[in-house]
Image (tube, rainbow, N blue to C red):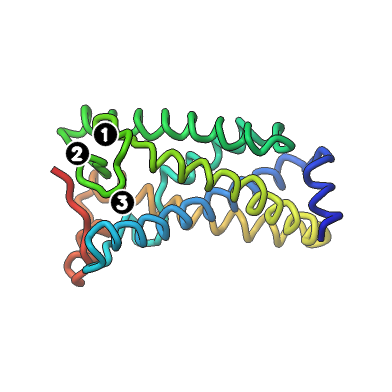
Amino acid sequence: MKEKYKQYINQDHSFDQATMLGIFCLIIVIAGIFGFVYEFIFYYFNSGMTEFYWRGGNFLPWINIYAIGAVLIYILTYRKRKNPLFVFLASVISTGILEYIGGWLLYHFGNGFRCWDYNNEILNFGNIDGFVCLRSVLIFGISSLLLIYVIVPFCFSLAKKMNRNRKKFLILSYSLCAIFLFDEVYNLIFARVLSLPRASDIYKALGFSYMTFK
C-alpha cells in the first residue's frame, strides 16, 4: 500500500483520454455526494440539532458546486501533489473565489435567490456578503487534501485494476456520471421549461425539509 502511494506521489500517471474522462466522471460523482453529506450534517447542527434538511435541488444526493470545485482543484493542484501546503492554500483561495462568484451570480441574476447565506449560519467568521466565510474555505481546503490524496488515488487505482476490463470501467464511470448529470439537467432546465415536477416539489410534498434563506 505504501509503495503504491509513493508511486502515486512521485510518478506521472498516463491514461488514455477515454479512461481519464472516466476518472473525472467518478470524481464528479464522489465530490457531489460528499458535498451533499457534508451539508446534510452541517445544517442539522446549524438548526440546533432539531431537524435534517435535504440539500440541493436534485432527486439524488448530489450538489453540483462541489463537483465543479473538485474538478477545479484537481486541475490546479494535481501536478503539485508533492506539496500538501500548496494544495491546501491553492484550494482555499480557488474555492473561495468559486463560492463567492457562484453565490453572487445566483443572487444578482436570480432575483435575490440564495442557495446558502453565511449571514444566517453558525461559525460564520470572516463572512463576506453571506457568500463566503473563513470556515467554509478552510473546510474546502481540508477536503481538497482528501480529494488529492485519497479520492484521486482511489480512482486511479480502480482504473488500473479494471484495465483488462476497460470497457466495464468506462461503462460504470460514464453511466454513473450520466445519471447524476441528467438529474441535474432535468431539475435545472427541463422541469422549468416544460413545467414538469421538480425534485424539490416532490420531496416537499413527501415531507422533506428544505433550508430557506432570506
Amino acid residing under circle 2: Phe
Residue at x 63%, y 53% (from the top left corner): 151
Q: Earlier in the sequence, mark 2 or mark 1?
A: 1
The x, y position of residue 153, in whole percent, is 71, 51
Q: Earlier in the sequence, mark 3 or mark 2?
A: 2
Residue at x 19%, y 39% (from the top left corner): 113
Q: Residue 46 versus residue 157: which sits nearer the camera?
A: 46
Residue at x 17%, y 51% (from the top left corner): 212
Q: Earlier in the sequence, mark 3 or mark 1?
A: 1
**Residue named by callout 2:** 113
Quadrant location, the N terminus: bottom right
**Residue named by callout 1:** 106
**Residue named by callout 3:** 187
Along the horizontal axis of the image, is 154 left or right of 206?
right
In the rendered view, tell whether residue 200 sits above or below residue 6.
below
Q: Residues within 10 Å of mark 3 (few under 14, many from 20)?
A: many
**Which secondary structure lies at badge 3?**
helix
User: How far is mark 3 from mark 2, CA to CA?
Assistant: 16 Å
